[in-house]
Image (cartoon, rainbow, N blue to C red):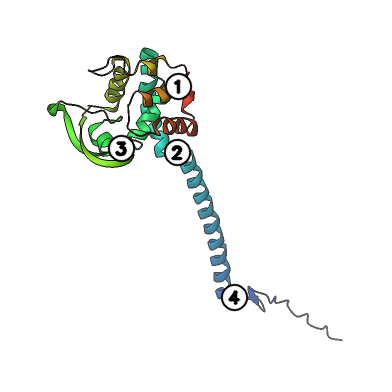
Amino acid sequence: MAKRRRKKYRPTNFLFNRGHLKWKNLFVLLLAFFLVGYGVYELHQIRVEQEARAKMPSAKEQFIASVKPEAQAMMKQHHVYASITIAQAILESNWGKSTLAAKYYNLFGVKSDDPNNSKVLRTQEYVNGEWITINGRFQVYASWNASIDDHALLMVNGTTYNSQQYAQVIAATSYQDAAQALQNAGYATDPTYASKLISIIQKYKLDQYDS
């Protein structure tokens, strides 16, 4: 009796049709693997970039870092709270972005009568219960550090017409008292000047630089 010839097994599935490779399906499968792998890689890169950006200091953090060392030096030398100096610089210069600060290095809105070392710029003052825009002549500095140094000396020496004008700022035993002393001494016409400084100090924890 003749033996029955066994049929050769020829698989049929996504990749094979009776033993014949489906090249088109293989290409689709490889493409799918590539796209999945590429997607995973892209997600990883996005996560890495997000983590890197999160670790980068913000513009505000960079500004604080740039003025902090000199503010602390002036505190040690003249007892002007570093937190007050930094908060005033933030408030007066809009984080160093105002024209007066960015172009002329004047962080504190310090005015001047010297036409050879000053610039006339538009500014706002609070007069008779309302804000008005006027032209003011402001001191020009060579650097932000020079502006910080001059600010400290203003607190120590006062103005030409009152050498004790900011004596209470120097004598203050807390940044809250120093902020109020600045307002009482007429540093700014804004009736909420002290509360704004205190709010900035508390929001950005600037009092940590007073120790």
Q: Could you tell me if the residues under marks 4 and 3 are in contact, i.e. CB atoms within 8 Å?
A: no
* Residue beneath the point at 20% across and 27% down: 112
Disc number for residue 56: 2
Residue tagged 3 = 128
Of mark 2 and mark 3, the one earlier in the sequence is 2
Along the viewing direction, whichever of 112 and 14 lies nearer the viewer: 112
Of tags 4 and 3, which is closer to the observer? Answer: 3
Mark 1 residue type: Asp
* Residue beneath the point at 35% across and 30% down: 89
**Secondary structure type for disc 3:** loop
Distance CA(mark 1)–CA(mark 3): 26 Å
Spot occupied by residue 82 in the image (x, y as percentages of width and height): 41, 22
Distance CA(mark 4)–CA(mark 3): 88 Å
Q: Residue furthest front?
A: 128
Dividing the picture into quarters, in which one does residue 6 lie? Answer: bottom right
Residue tagged 1 = 177
Dividing the picture into quarters, in which one does residue 166 lie? Answer: top left
Residue tagged 4 = 22
Spot occupied by residue 176 in the image (x, y as percentages of width and height): 46, 24
Mark 3 residue type: Asn
